[in-house]
Image (cartoon, rainbow, N blue to C red):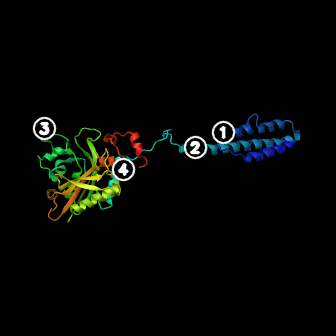
Amino acid sequence: MALKDNIQALLGQVNELKANNAEELEALRIKYLSKKGEITALFNEFRNVAPEEKRELGQLLNQLRQTTEERIASLREAVESRESRAESKLDLTRTPDPIALGTRHPLSLVREEIEDIFSRIGFTIAQGPEVEDDKHVYGMLNFAPEHPARDMQDTFFVEKEIGVQKPTDVLLRSHTSSVQTRVMTSQKPPIRVLCPGRVYRNEAISARAHCFFHQVEGLYIDKNVSFADLREALLYFSKEMFGPETKIRLRPSYFPFTEPSAEMDISCNICGGTGCSFCKGTGWVEILGCGMVDPNVLEACGIDSKEYSGYAFGMGVERITNLKYRVKDLRLFSENDVRFLRQFESC
């Protein structure tokens, strides 16, 4: 009864069969059910058994083959189900090449740092439209219609009236001071806002100038605001942005919307104030303009200049970024050269 023992042993193996993939499953099929498989070998051996044993052994062999076929079919369903689930998780639209992550733009990094510094002393963010009207950009800021200071701005006007020399009042804002006028006409003092945004001027594009750039302007209006308050706020900003050893100086200047007005310099953070090519040997670098809000501006915006006073300041984000990261060409900020942008991956 050696054949019977072999059948029972093989049946025990079949009940324990496992396959993790289609290749292993095919190998099992070949091993047990192919023409040269183990079950076929047992059928060949069955031809030589005694006639009185053929009935019993034939039934056992048929049962073994049926059990093996059922077991392999069951394993095939399990393998196909696993592969189907794996394929459903596969995104066939995804590129086979690695996707490089983008980097933060240096202007965004610096603008957000400026906003964060001033937010610590109570400033909130105010936004306004880039396409503006003459009233908010110039009229309410003490620019008379024929004021020569308008020529300082090199404004982009959106269109001109037919047959009339004077431009219409639709223009691309040349400074974010227009946001300040909108805030002053819509809110009552105290007002403490920071106005970041893009501005436009008709200038030749070069390493030191562009037809569009970014500004951050600040405005604080309340009772008894003084020039000393302005100086302390700007000193705090300078030390936070450029380091605790930074010094500032204020030089008299002129802006139509502030009186008195000043330009602010900081001690050169590249040479430490000893003099270098960046600061042209002076040890100082100009970074912003500032001053006390002109009473005419307050009155134009509906604020009583006898009760309230305020200060304002404005800086170019590109200028601050140049000082912080020593970028020498303004055009790099708008060319989207990935070789330039990758330098700020760790910032």
Residue receiving disc 4 = 109
Q: Taking 283 as reference, is 167 above or below it? A: above
Q: CA distance from mark 1 to mark 3?
A: 81 Å
Q: Mark 1 Cα within 10 Å, few/some/many (few <14, many 20+)?
A: few
The mark lying in front, picked from 2 and 1, is: 1
Check whether the beta carbons of the residues at disc 4 and disc 3 lie within 8 A of each other: no
Q: Position of residue 251 (x, y in %)?
A: 21, 53
Quadrant of the image containing the N terminus: top right
Q: Mark 3 Cα within 10 Å, few/some/many (few <14, many 20+)?
A: few
Q: What residue is at 36 percent from the left and 50 percent from the top?
A: 109
Tag 4's secondary structure? helix
State the residue lying farthest toward the front: 274
Q: CA distance from mark 4 to mark 3?
A: 44 Å
Left or right relative to 190: residue 49: right
Q: CA distance from mark 3 to mark 2?
A: 69 Å
Residue 274: give its label.
none
Residue 84: give its label.
2
The mark lying in front, picked from 1 and 4, is: 4
